[in-house]
Structure formats: C-alpha cells, structure tokens
Amino acid sequence: MPVSSLPFLRLSGPPRAQGRQHGDALRSSISEVRHRWRESLAQRFGVRPDSFIEAFLAKTRFVAAMRHWTPALLEEIEGIAEGSGRSLAETLAFQFMDEEWWFGAMHYRQASAEANRCSIIASRGREGQAPILAQNMDLRAYLDGGQALISTATNGGPRTTVMTICGMIGLCGANQAGLGVAVNTLWQLPSAADGLPVACVMRGILEQPDLAAATKWICQPRHASGQHYLIGDPEGFASFEASATLASNIPWGDSPVFVHTNHPLAAPSNERLKKAEENSRGRYATLCNLMTAKTPTGEEVKATLSSRQGPHPVSVRPSPDDPTSTMTFASIIMELNRPPTIQLGGGPPCSNPYRPIGP
C-alpha cells in the first residue's frame, strides 16, 4: 500500500472512545481484512472460523491478563468492536496474532504454524545523528492493504504513534518521549495460555516515559508468547527475549549496531531446530554482513531493509498465488529524537519507497 494512501488516525478521549473512533473510521477496511483472516483460519487450521475463535478464547486467559496489566487496552479493543460493528470475540481474537500461531499449532495442524519473519536493526547513533530503531514487519500476505497508523495516548502516558493492522491495537512504534519498540517472534520459546499477549506488551512498553521505566515494566507480566522486544530511547537501547518463564536481557556489547531476526540469541544453538531456523539465520547473516561495525546512516538502514540478497532476503515479496505466504507488510525507521522522526514503507521496501510520517 502506498504510504500516501495509508490511513493515519489521531485518536483522543478515553480508551473506549479511542477504540470507537478507530473502528468507525476504518470500518470498511476492517471488514475486508477480517474476511480474509477468517478465510485463512479455515484454510490453515481446517476448522470453521467461529469455532476456532470460540476455542481460542475459551482455552486461554489472555483477557484476564489484560484486565490485570493493561485494562485500558481491553477497553480500547471493546471500542474497536463497537465502532467497526464486529463481534467482541472476533475483535479480541484478532489482537492475539502471535498467540494464534502457537495455539493453532498446538490444537489443530502443526504444519500450519509458520512463524512470521521480522528483521530488526538498531544503531546507537553518533554526534549529530539520533539513535535509529528500524524493522521489517513480515506478516501473511492476506493482511496486505490493511496497513494503518494510529496516534494514541492512554493512562496519562505520552502520545504514541503505532504501526498496525486495521482493527488491531498495534505492531510496533514510538512515543513522543522518543521511546520506541520493535518486535519479532521467537516461536521456539515457551508460551503461556494465561500470559499477556504481545500486542499488549508492546503498547504497555510505549506507555512508559523512558527506557528505564520500560525495561522495568517488561519484566513484570507473564508473557503469553516467545518474543524479542528491542526497546530504545535517545539515551540507549535494551534487548529482551521474553517467554512464559523469563524475560532475558540480551547484552549488546560495544558494537554501534545490533540486529535480530527470529531465533533466540540468549540460548545456545539448538541443532534440532537449525533447519526450521534456516530462514531466520540466513537473514541474520545478511543483516550482520550489511551492517558492518560502523554507525549506519538512515539511508544505509533503508538499503539493508530493502535487500533481496541471498536465498532468504530481508525484504520479502508475497507469493502471487498464496495469500497465506509471508511478505514484508510494512517497514518502519524510527529516529529516536524527542519527539521521534518516523519513516514508513507500506509493503516490501524493495518496491515501496519510504515516506516521512508527520507528528
């Protein structure tokens, strides 16, 4: 989707009102994306969509975790359901994207649980250049066309710009204090049916005023899914590999650049999983090769995220014949100033130019 046509909503008021504004403004797009998502549930898991959603919510306790840790986000989701005219059950299940993958693999078809393939780059910055946090967000191709940006503020925290899918509370983003977060799934790590889902963890991080508060907050809830969170602000970065059992802080070392894909860096290499991790390890090697031990400019980060090198390219084009294939849904580059400067590509950056996003 060209960034010029990508919806950008500035939401205001209490959380439920913000959700209603989101749902109402994007009602048509939400309906279209949900229709394709429901078709994919049937295709991937061999079950009626409503049956999947009912079992998904009945056999997990994500809502209870949200009510404890992020109650304002639960209200926002209820508002999205009301504004869009979709059921609350469907709207809740749609938020739990990473959780859907492992739940489907556990209860339906193991082969259908292909993980997403996200690539992250962070740069400490240098004199005259702000720190950079950037990501290719790779999702299933049936979500293409559902790209959106929302500007929101909850719990008295700083206003936040979030890249998302129409009808979802968010994927990644940055707040006005210059605190940003990027995420990538670590499907190898333990999950928990009573944990806090990834989308809520991400938004909870962005409610914090700075990196110190964010790194303290992320260690408090039990995590529903294995996930890497790279958190940064103008003062520095922290990398966490989180799971149902632990949130491990990954040392960065002295390098000016840090990269991450979809295999854990904190755990020893697992020979049994290496074949399944081949794509992730291939992209990781490409990122390491392109991001040499120097401080990259924003243009160099763009070029790396646009790379089509090797058998496992960083910028992923969709398969024209398979809507469940993986593609780069969007690419975001956040310069962590106060406030941050954001550039976004609405699709694979190898073929979709970046555009600056206004405050």
Image: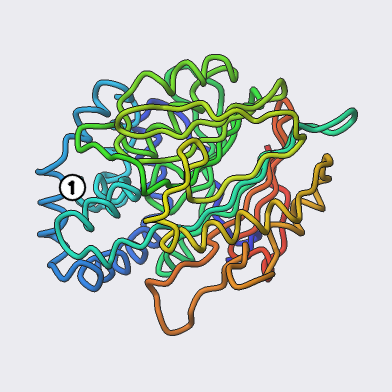
Query: Seen from this angle, which residue lies furthest right?
Result: 128
In the image, residue 232 sits, relative to residue 111, either above or below, namely above
Query: Seen from this angle, which residue lies furthest bottom?
Result: 321
Q: How is the image coloured?
A: rainbow
Position of the C terminus, as image quadrant, is top right
The kind of residue tagged 1 is: Ala
Comparing 197 with 143, the one in front is 197
Q: Residue at x 73, y 49 (%)?
A: 356
Q: Residue at x 60, y 28 (%)?
A: 251
Position of the N terminus, as image quadrant, is bottom right
Comparing 309 with 166, the one in front is 309
Q: Is residue 275 left or right of residue 254?
A: left
Q: Residue at x 51, y 52 (%)?
A: 148
Q: Is residue 41 left or right of residue 300?
A: left
Q: Residues within 10 Å of mark 1 (few under 14, many from 20)?
A: some
- Residue 36 at x, y = what percent? 32, 69
- Residue 247 at x, y = what percent? 41, 27
Classify mark 1: helix, strand or loop. helix
Reading the image, the residue beneath label 1 is 89
Comparing 192 with 80, the one in front is 192
Q: Quadrant of residue 130?
A: top right
- Residue 249 at x, y = what percent? 51, 26
- Residue 83 at x, y = what percent? 31, 46
Number of numbered tags placed on the structure image: 1
Q: Quadrant of residue 73?
A: top left
Q: Quadrant of residue 139?
A: bottom left
Q: Residue at x 33, y 23 (%)?
A: 221
